[in-house]
Image: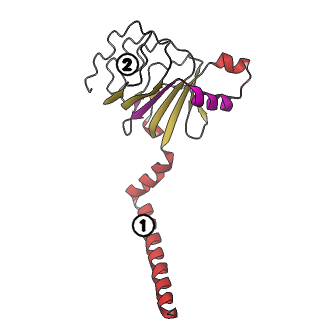
């Protein structure tokens, strides 16, 4: 009985050693090494549009406000970029706009920008809006690097302008099932030039 247990333990040790060997070989392979190096760098980009003046007035810490924004925001949009995307990803972000803050997974605030770089390795972009925007004019116009756009939450009914929202947008999938268009005054050319849909 004891000898069978010993041989079983030896087999387990041998198998564990083989697995470690295989893993080390994989990690040392040039191509696979690149994959191993890239995996931890893949990120979700979170863009929060919030009312800076209100936050300052009620003296909220930026991280607390971020948590509040995620919990109570009435507009949330999820974007999935193409692999190794590069280019513009959202039109509503302007460099002079003071209400945008961009975060990666590590919650470190990033500088404002409206384009992706191949080195970003972004697999998902989450846009959260708690500031009362009333226009989505040209929001995703000329967007080339986004595979899918999904309006996950759209409870706000103060949007009045949806002209050219997806004008020449090259996304393959657009989900607008949650759109609230109760007070929209114009949807002129909203999907003009969306050849992939």
- CA distance for labels 1 and 2: 46 Å
Residue 161 highlighted magenta (yes or no): no
Tally of marks: 2
| Residue bounds of the magenta highlight | 60-87
Which of the numbered marks, if any, corresponds to residue 154? none
Q: Which residue corresponds to mark 2? A: 141
Task: Name which of mark 1 and mark 2 comes first in the sequence.
Answer: 1
Residue 178 in which image quadrant: top left
Residue 75 highlighted magenta (yes or no): yes
Asked which secondary structure carries label 2, the reply is: loop
With respect to residue 185, does 18 lie above or below? Answer: below
Percent across and percent down for residue 61 are 71, 29
Percent across and percent down for residue 193 are 27, 18
Name of the residue lying farthest toward the left = 195
With respect to residue 49, does 148 lie above or below? Answer: below
Q: Which residue corresponds to mark 1? A: 25
Rate crowding at label 2 as few (under 14), some (14 to 19) or many (20 or more) other CA atoms within 10 Å: many
Looking at the picture, tell me which residue is in the foreground, 32 or 30. Answer: 32
Percent across and percent down for residue 70 are 58, 30
- At x 40%, y 57%, the residue is 32
- At x 45%, y 36%, the residue is 124
Q: How is the image coloured?
A: secondary structure
- At x 39%, y 34%, the residue is 81
Asked which secondary structure carries label 1, the reply is: helix
With respect to residue 146, does 24 lie above or below? Answer: below
Looking at the picture, tell me which residue is in the foreground, 135 or 113. Answer: 135
Relative horizontal placement of residue 186, taking residue 52 as reference (left or right): left
* Closer to viewer: mark 1 or mark 2: 2
């Amino acid at each position: 009985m004891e000898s069978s247990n010993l041989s079983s333990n030896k087999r387990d040790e041998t198998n564990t050693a083989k697995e470690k060997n295989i893993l080390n070989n994989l990690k040392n392979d040039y191509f696979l090494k690149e994959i191993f190096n890239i995996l931890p760098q893949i990120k979700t980009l979170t863009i929060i549009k919030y009312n800076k003046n209100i936050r300052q007035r009620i003296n909220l810490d930026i991280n607390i406000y971020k948590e509040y924004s995620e919990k109570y925001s009435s507009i949330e949009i999820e974007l999935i970029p193409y692999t190794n995307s590069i280019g513009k990803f959202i039109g509503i972000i302007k460099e002079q706009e003071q209400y945008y803050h961009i975060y990666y997974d590590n919650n470190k605030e990033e500088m404002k920008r409206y384009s992706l770089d191949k080195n970003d390795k972004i697999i998902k972009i989450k846009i959260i809006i708690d500031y009362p925007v009333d226009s989505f004019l040209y929001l995703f116009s000329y967007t080339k690097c986004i595979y899918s756009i999904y309006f996950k939450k759209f409870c706000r009914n103060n949007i009045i302008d949806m002209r050219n929202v997806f004008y020449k947008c090259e996304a393959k999938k657009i989900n607008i099932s949650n759109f609230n268009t109760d007070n929209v005054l114009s949807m002129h050319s909203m999907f003009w030039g969306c050849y992939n849909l």
